[in-house]
Amino acid sequence: MKESLIYGKKKVVTGNHAVSYGVLLSKAEVIAAYPITPQTQIVELLSEFCASGLLKAKFIKVESEHSAMAACVGAAATGCRTFTATSAHGLALMHEMLHWAVGGRLPIVLANVNRAMGPGWSVWTDQNDSLSQRDVGFVQFYCESNQEVLDTTIQAFKIAETCLIPVMLVLDAFVLSHTSEPVDIPYQEDVDKFLPPYKPKYFLDVNDPRAFGGLTSPDHYYEIRYKIEEAHRKALKVSEEVDNEFYQIFGRKYGVVESYQCEDAKLILVTSGTITGTARQVIDEERSKGKRVGLLKIRLFRPSPISQIKEILTKAEKVAVIDRNISFGHSGIFCQEIKSILYNEIRRPMVFGFVIGLGGRDVVPDDIREIIDFTYKADYPEEMVYFRGVRL
Amino acid sequence: MRWQFANDIKEYMNQGHLACPGCGGAYAMRLALKALGKNTIVVIPACCWSIIDGPFPLHCLEVPVYHTAFETAAVVASGIRAALDIKGKTDIEVLAFAGDGGTLDIGIQALSAACERNEKIIYACYDNEAYMNTGIQRSSATPYGAWTTTTPRENFKKERKKNISEIIAAHRIPYVATASIGFPDDLILKFKKAKEVKGTAFIHIFAPCPTGWRMAPELMIKISQLAVDCKIFPLYEVFDGVKYNINYQPKNIPVKEYLRLQGRFSHLTEKEIETIQKEVDDNWEILIKKTRI
């Protein structure tokens, strides 16, 4: 692949390849991955980049996702910029090593293509794979477009390396992963300016022989966890700074959340991932009919942008949270998060939770309209969670 | 002659480690590092060595150590290798140092994959024939006849020990060797060879656990020599998975001499001991045949 054909051009690429270009531009040094639909194209293209010499990285073709993350752990602990990608069962298999990456304070970047968990086997999108990893301590970004995917990949390395915390960027299966959109591929020198080489303070060094991750007594473990929490709080601030810095160079920014038409809104929808794009269109229509509706897109899920969410949502009377995931026996996971953020506010909106689109079932504008109508008319959320269109 | 290298005064393992008295695994590490020297990074998965190294912020080795999850020694070592290579630090060795559980059981998938990729790492398994760190539970390295807490009384282990060296040799990696802490110079020489190999080297170390074997700690060396001399644990090398070389001619001591020193075998009847003797003799014949290929 010729360099002149890539950099500084607008290319029509899939979400998967947007990740690959992001990793290429970020000059990852070690990549370890295992194939899984719908992620595989990410690492196939990275293999091409490595084979052609365009990306000077070591690509370890491991035998499982658990080993993919373990290899990244080893490489990152030795001071390399590392990357892996996975999906659904692959992410679930990685679970133990996700903890290791966080506890080891290793700035690994992971792209997860949101895919529903089996059984029954599904390759289509929902968020239960990544949200099941909520508490491991990865930073999590949910992306709406392929441009955002590429840009978030580059930003992810910077946030990870600044805060020494791993970052997961998440994109919807097929709706983004296999859908082509025009994407601006930045110039390498601009990315180099934004993201200098990774130079860790602590790494496996034969001239300074330390032990990493050894037996830790109750005298120390608590403080080490506290420092991870501190790193997350820092990551929230850093995510905004990095986004602003990115804007200065590339002219694009996303925010940790995005408030759309929320200023005078009585009802605010809360969305993440590609449902946001559909909702945005419906909000425009409803606004033209005079309905005071707005949209809050959650881009950064962890660390939780608590004050940003509070500031936007406390002005509304009602909030409808749309979840493409479910915590069985309770409700959608974003809905729980929003409720917990708002609970202590004296003036707080009523929160309605909707679970739709599981296993990749299409979410169309009519679904969003129904949710808006329902929430508008209801006085109180009688149910913890509402399902739409269950065909029994 | 046998102690020429082992008495080399340069130590990379310090006092104050947390091993039990008579720990074969602790001595195995001490010897391995004498062979490999300062330019070594050690990967330790969950095993006794997770404890032996010492609690945070202390550690007893004069080389960097990465402690990792149970099943990941070989692949974390692969990740470190890749990182060192991309940084041009090709003069640094990566040593994965795992117990038998972490090697023969939970870690075999990642180990097999690292061998298939022929990663330039040294993988050493210090085999004390059970899950000793969790308190003596049977592993696939536990031999026939042994008592453990999960093979108690008359339910002593009825299955044979998994032959890990043969499994790894079948990957056709350049170097596989067995070693015993009762033969320190042989062990050290094998680590020195492993360092020179272009690809994966696997060393299977006989490393007794007096605590788990119900045995006096001072028998640590003696039992490690007896295991070899009664052919239970022959010392040999396999080059490229096909060329076998026996390093030491055993003295043909009956297995009974080895078994009777260990409480874990104290329940065995004469008949059961005969069964073990026959299996050991048969295995030796198979090994001899392999050297003639």
Image (cartoon, helix red, strand yellow):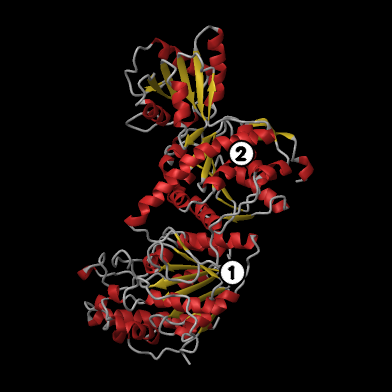
Asked whether the viewer can see residue B207, the reply is no
Q: Amino acid at mark 1?
A: Ile
Q: Which residue is mark 2?
A: A16
- Where residue A93 sits: x, y (%)? 45, 48
Q: CA distance from mark 2 to mark 1?
A: 36 Å
Subunit ID for the residue under disc 1: B
Name the residue furthest bottom: B1
Q: Nearer the viewer, residue B156 or A199?
A: A199
- Where residue A313 sits: x, y (%)? 44, 21
Name which residue lies at 24% across and 78% down: B263
Helix, strand or loop status at disc 2: helix
Find out whether the residues at labels 2 and 1 contact each other: C-beta distance under 8 Å: no
Q: Which residue is mark 1?
A: B92
Using residue A96 as the reference point, say whether residue B135 is left or right of it. Answer: left
- Where residue B255 sits: x, y (%)? 32, 84
Q: Amino acid at mark 2?
A: Asn
Quarter placement of the C terminus of chain B: bottom right
